[in-house]
Image (tube, grey):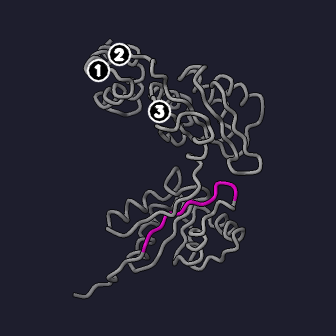
Amino acid sequence: MSTDRPDRPGLLVLAATPIGDSEDASARLRRLLADADVVAAEDTRRTRALAARLGVTIGGRLVSHHEHNESGRVAELLDVVAGGGTVLVVSDAGMPAVSDPGFRAVQAAVAADLPVTVAPGPSAVLTALALSGLPTDRFCFEGFLPRKPGERARALAALAAERRTLVLFEAPHRVPETLDAMAEAFGADRPGAVCRELTKTYEEVVRGPLAELAAWAHSGDVRGEVVLVVGGAPADGPADAGDLVPEVLARVDAGERLKEAVAGVAEAAGVGKRELYAAALAARTR
């Protein structure tokens, strides 16, 4: 039986790029930039500049692959893989698919039974977590919070009882108002850390209670790439079902079904689902 697809397909590779210091680039990333048939870059100009700093000549075709064209680009990339070629996916910094393009390509490759692998490396999430001084045994990554105040408040309310350390990205100009909102939702004394310009010349990590971090952010001009790390809710946090109802309702307002919201909040807080469901249902019918 004839087929256009070779016996051995190629490979889709997601590769981490330096988040600041070019010396963090792995030997594998350098080789992939030189040898891949196609390099799919979030910003082709930045990828060319990175390759120049690394002394590498990009050997294959360099194409753009960003949030605005990702859906249309994936089929083209997978055609290359299906034809036996190697496609390298890179973002501007850090790991593709983590708040950056890459997820759709992986999802489509898995569905098409095409090989996918990762060339690991720098990660702003893990770097900030390690530097924060906050517990690292259990953590969750929340990406970027909603920009609108009301939506952001609801998102934070849903995280108020989360026991794990939280890691989030934020635009520098929104850091002061985000820290204000966090202090209101989590409590002024909840510990946190603002990590900016990680691995760069002006790397800075400011640690302290959220209220103090908010005051620090308002007192100056926060610049550069920023990662926020916040300690989880204390183990002796609210254990009464009634205290958890606002969080449940916030999750429902954000689109979750009541039953699912109750299950998630109850598990995180260590309370009974039946009791919390009854309390939330009563609050909704008032």
* Disc ID at residue 164: 3
Which stretch is magenta?
A: 11-21
Measure the alpha-carbon separation of dots 2 and 3: 20 Å
Where, by quadrant of the figure, is residue 75 drawn? bottom left
Q: Which amino acid does label 3 sit on?
A: Arg
User: Quick check: 154 left or right of 1?
Assistant: right
* Callout 2 touching callout 1 (CB < 8 Å): yes
In what element is the residue under mark 2? helix
Q: What residue type is labelled 2?
A: Ala
Say which label, 2 or 1, has the lower sequence index: 2
Residue named by callout 1:
272
> Residue farthest to the top?
286
Quarter of the image with the N terminus in it: bottom left
Residue named by callout 2:
241
Q: Is residue 157 above or below residue 90?
A: above
> Which residue appears at 32% of the width and 63% of the height?
111
Residue 49 percent coordinates (x, y): 70, 67
* Disc ID at residue 125: none
